[in-house]
Image (cartoon, rainbow, N blue to C red):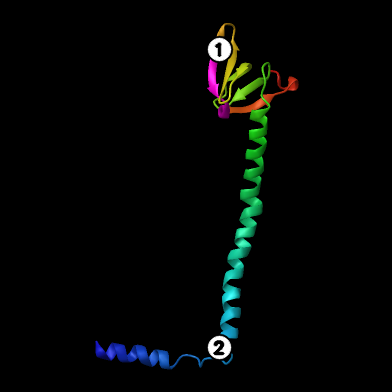
Amino acid sequence: MLYLLGLITEAYAMGPAPQGGGQQGGAQGMLASILPLVLIFVVFYFLLIRPQQKKAKEHRQMLENVKKGDKVVTSGGVYGVVESVGPNTVVLKIAENVKVKFGKGYIASVRTGSDED
């Protein structure tokens, strides 16, 4: 076991000599190692995070603008016409004399006149 420790110390002794400048070389090396991480974060922000935030903001605005008479589609695929709007719920008419209450967040989209089936 002691012989093995002797080999390890010899291996360190054979390493390259330390370079002059001490702190300056370390700061440049640290910057060079952090730079790729910063670039990866920037790429993720512009390709993933920012578009999701924009889409969520558009969805919130769409939910705030839902009014009686709008034709909507829920996230479950139910097509209906808005009968009434509450702070957190929406009552949809999905057939004659059939009304269903949904959470406002489950409205996926508001249909336009050109979306008719």
Residue 20 rendering spot, x and y as whole percentages: 57, 92
Residue at (56%, 26%) from the top-left corner? 88
* Tag 1 residue: 99
Q: How many marks?
A: 2
Up the image or down, 54 lies above or below 92; here it is below
Q: CA distance from mark 1 to mark 2?
A: 75 Å
Identity, as a three-letter code, of the amino acid under mark 1: Lys
Q: Please identify the quarter of the rendering in which residue 100 is found.
A: top right
Identity, as a three-letter code, of the amino acid under mark 2: Gly
Residue 67, magenta (yes or no): no
Residue 63 rendering spot, x and y as whole percentages: 64, 29
SS state under label 1 = strand
Mark earlier in primary sequence (1, 2): 2
Up the image or down, 21 lies above or below 78; here it is below
Q: Dot 2 surroundings within 10 Å: few (below 14), some, or many (20 or more)?
A: few
Q: Dot 1 surroundings within 10 Å: few (below 14), some, or many (20 or more)?
A: some
Q: Are the residues flagged by discs 1 and 2 in contact, CB closer than 8 Å?
A: no
* Tag 2 residue: 22
Up the image or down, 92 lies above or below 29; here it is above
Residue at (67%, 21%) from the top-left corner? 67
Up the image or down, 77 lies above or below 54; here it is above
Q: Left or right? Give the position of 85 relative to 8.
A: right
Quadrant position of the C terminus in the picture: top right
Residue farthest to the left, as pictured: 1
Residue at (55%, 12%) from the top-left corner? 99
Closest to the observer, 23 or 51: 23
Quadrant position of the N terminus in the picture: bottom left
Residue at (59%, 16%) from the top-left corner? 92
Residue farthest to the top, as pictured: 97
Over which residues does the magenta segment extend? 100-106
SS state under label 2 = loop
